[in-house]
Structures are given as C-alpha cells and as structure tokens.
Image (spheres, rainbow, N blue to C red):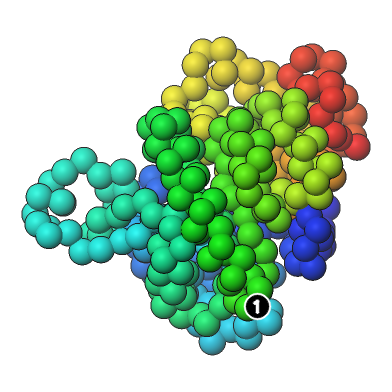
Amino acid sequence: MDPFKKRQLGRTSVMLPQFGFGGAGLGNLFDDIKETTADDTLAAAWDEGVRYYDTSPWYGRGLSEHRFGRALFGKPREDFIISTKVGRLFSAPKDIDAFCASERDWHLGLPFEHRHDYTYEGVMRSYEDSLQRLRLNRIDLLIIHDLDSLVLGSERLVDAHLNQLATGGMAALQDLKAAGKIKAIGAGVNQTGTISKFLDVLDLDFFLVALPYTLAEQPVLDSEFPLCEKRGVGIIIGAVYASGILATGAVPGAKINYREPTADEADRIRRIEAVCRSFDTPLPAAALQYTLHHPSVTSIIPGAIEPSQVRKNIAFFRHETPAELWGELKKQGLLRADAPTP
C-alpha cells in the first residue's frame, strides 16, 4: 500500500494522504519526551514524506501544538495539511503549587488550567490560540474535541455542551469555513453513539474516530458508519493501534482503549496475532492496513515518539498483506463477517 496516495475526505475538496501523523504522544501522553527527541521524530516524519499532521490543544496542554509548530515553521504552507481541535480553553493557574500537586488529567503537560467551552467566542479563541502555538495563520481541518461522556463524565454535561455548540460554536466553525480559514469541520469520536448523536444536530464534514473502529473491535459498523456513508461524511482513524496493544501484542503493560485489557481481550489479540503470523504479516501491519479498507475511511494517523517508530509505521503500512488473512480472521470469528476487506 502507498502511504501517501491521496483520498477525498467525504464530500469536501480536501485530499488527504492515506497515512498521517497523530500528535497525542508528542504531548507526553504516556512518557516525558525530550524536546530534542520530539524534534527528531517530526523531522524524520517530514523526511519520510509525511505531509498530514494532527494535533490538539489538549495534548500536553499546548505542548504538542508547540512542538508541531516548531517542526513545521518555515516549511512551504501548501506542502502540508494540519488539523487541530476545539473545545477547551487554557489559562495560567492562580495557585501554581496547588495545581502542580493536584491530580491532573495530563500530568506531563504544560502547567495550564483548562475549561470546556463550545460557545461561539470559545471556538474563536481556541482557533486563534492554536494559530499562535502552531506558528501558522490558518488551519486546514478543525475538530470538535472530546464531547462525550467518557471525558465529561455524564450525559447531562454532554447534552449541555452539545447545545452550547449547536447554538454558538457551530456557527463559529461555519464562519471560519466560509471565510476560508479552515477547509473542513469534524468531530472526534471515542465511543459508540456519538456519531449519530452529532449528526442529529450538526452538519459535519468528517469524524476522527479514535477507538471504536480498529482491528480489535468494530461496533460502529452496526449503524454509525452506514450513516456516514449515506450522508457522505468522511472518516479519519486515530488510535489505530487501540492505544497500544495492536502495536505490541498482548504483552505485560499493553493498553487497549487506554486501559488494561481483560483476560478475554488479551486472548483475542493473541489469537489475531497468531493468524497474522501464519500469513507472515506483523500484527501492526494488519492493524494499520485494516481500517483503510472501509470506503468512508480517508486516512489513518498513528503516532510516534521517536524517529524509529515513524519509519517502522511506514514500513508496516507498505507490507504486502495477503488478502486471505482477512478471510481467516473472519472464519475464526476474530473479525466481523461484514467488515470491509479485500
């Protein structure tokens, strides 16, 4: 597979490479990454031909955007595409000692407080703040971030913020698009039910699906991806390794969907890996390639925290995977029978 072949993103005019770079890891998601290592990793991505980059203000509380901005500074603007996100605003904490001593969601990030804000003014400020951190004067794709109960903690808060978005923030996104300051509007998805809930009230160009469509599980095939197909809504896949386990296998410490796997989940991954091995295909190669067989999926954005990981991901993407592998996974009940495959 050619990682840099371009596909159309839904109904938009945006043409994305099949392979991009996800920026959560460079926001110190799991590890404290040195600045020089972050610089070297992004330099390796550019040198290997990567031209689509995804980040967020939330990743490291601004840290990921700062690092991407430094790496892309001076590069011809027409040569790359960048997406970032809205939904949180940041400010300096009143009591820095208390803030640093507290339990924080992103403990290896920068020392800034955050609050959720999906109003017109909040979206506009988030956009402007991101421009400055990224050292850019426009962003290509802007994504509504983390508007779900996994993050907010309750459906009541989800509904309140969704109403805030529908009555204010969405107009800001549409104004930015009409003015040519962004090319497409998307929303991030961490759990099933979000896609249909959003499409009931918002006119979106695409979704960035972070968890419920990987080689490990595919619940969005029931109704949500068919709905996207019907409406011409594009899909970008994040967390293509299911937060790690599809990159490493079910080894000690591996995470699935940002948590420890159950015994059944770990066993399922071991069985998937065994099938891949019988076809001389590394598990990460199958994980990277699988999601792109869906007709609505435009691009995948695996992350990396060191240069070697960038090169390995691209090599896995290019691995020649036998079509028979997918049939065997389906035969053993390890992949849904209706999952799109060659």
| Left or right side of 41 for 89 | left
Q: Nearer the viewer, residue 182 or 4?
A: 182
Residue indicated by mark 1: 180
Residue 92 lies, in percent from the top left, at 20, 64
Q: Residue at x 57, y 47 (%)?
A: 188
Q: Residue at x 16, y 43 (%)?
A: 102
Expressed as whole percent of the image width and height from the top left, the position of residue 1 reads 83, 52
Query: Would residue 231 be seen by someone viewing this image from the given angle?
Result: yes
Relative height, residue 256 to residue 166 (above, below): above
Q: Which quarter shows the C terminus? A: top right
Category of crowding for the residue at label 1, using alpha-carbon neighbours closer than 10 angstroms: few (below 14), some (14–19), many (at least 20): few
Question: What residue appears at the point 45 percent right and 38 percent down from the top-left corner?
Answer: 158
> Given the image, on which type of amino acid does mark 1 rest?
Gly
At numbered mark 1, what does the secondary structure look like: helix, strand or loop?
Answer: loop
Q: Is residue 289 left or right of residue 139?
A: right
Residue 77, image x, y percentages: 62, 83
122 horizontally vs 101: left or right: right
Query: In which image quadrant can residue 170 be found?
Result: bottom right
Q: Closer to the camera, 141 or 51?
A: 141
